[in-house]
Amino acid sequence: MSRVKGGVTSNKRRKNILSAVKGYRFGRSKKKREAREATFHAQLHAFDHRKDKKGDFRQLWIARINAVLKSEGLKYSRFIKAMNDKQVGLNRKVLATLAKDRPESFKRVIEHTTK
């Protein structure tokens, strides 16, 4: 049986591992062993942080809405209750975008819900 040298396979494996850690700092982006460990840790936390991201964005949206409502003399909780009572179907993401980018439209939403 002829001898098979593993250089091509080893280099390909190393290249794939290092391509997964592009942008990492120090040895984690250059050394195979450190890169492997870095990807293990990154994948370990990726699931949890994907779940956390949803809550983080919700907090951001609420903070943006609340900031504009305070300047209008309203409380966030009362505004949300008024929206539910009037059956306004805008979610917090849309409300935060309106409050940030289109304040005149957001004021119209406030007027509609607080009448």
Image: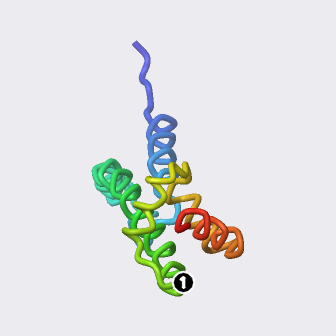
Q: In this view, does 20 lie above or below 81?
A: above
Task: Specify whether residue 60 is in view.
Answer: yes
Q: In this view, does 66 lie above or below 112?
A: below
Tell me the quadrant of the picture where the C terminus can be found: bottom right
**115 relative to 18 in the view: left or right:** right
Quadrant position of residue 106: bottom right
**20 relative to 55 in the view: left or right:** right
Which residue is nearer to you in this view: 74 or 90? 74
The residue that appears at 43% across and 17% down in the rendered structure is: 2
- Residue 93 x, y percent position in the rendering: 53, 59
Which residue is nearer to you in this view: 89 or 49? 89
- Residue 101 x, y percent position in the rendering: 68, 72
The residue that appears at 47% across and 39% down in the rendered structure is: 7
The residue that mark 1 highlights is 72
Q: Is residue 62 above or below residue 17?
A: below
Task: Specify whether residue 33 is in view.
Answer: no
Tell me the quadrant of the picture where the N terminus can be found: top left
Element marked by disc 1: helix
- Residue 4 x, y percent position in the rendering: 44, 25
Q: In this view, does 87 lie above or below 112?
A: above
Q: Residue furthest front?
A: 115
Q: Which amino acid does label 1 sit on?
A: Glu
**70 relative to 45 in the view: left or right:** right
The residue that appears at 39% across and 64% down in the rendered structure is: 56
- Residue 103 x, y percent position in the rendering: 67, 75
The residue that appears at 44% across and 40% down in the rendered structure is: 10
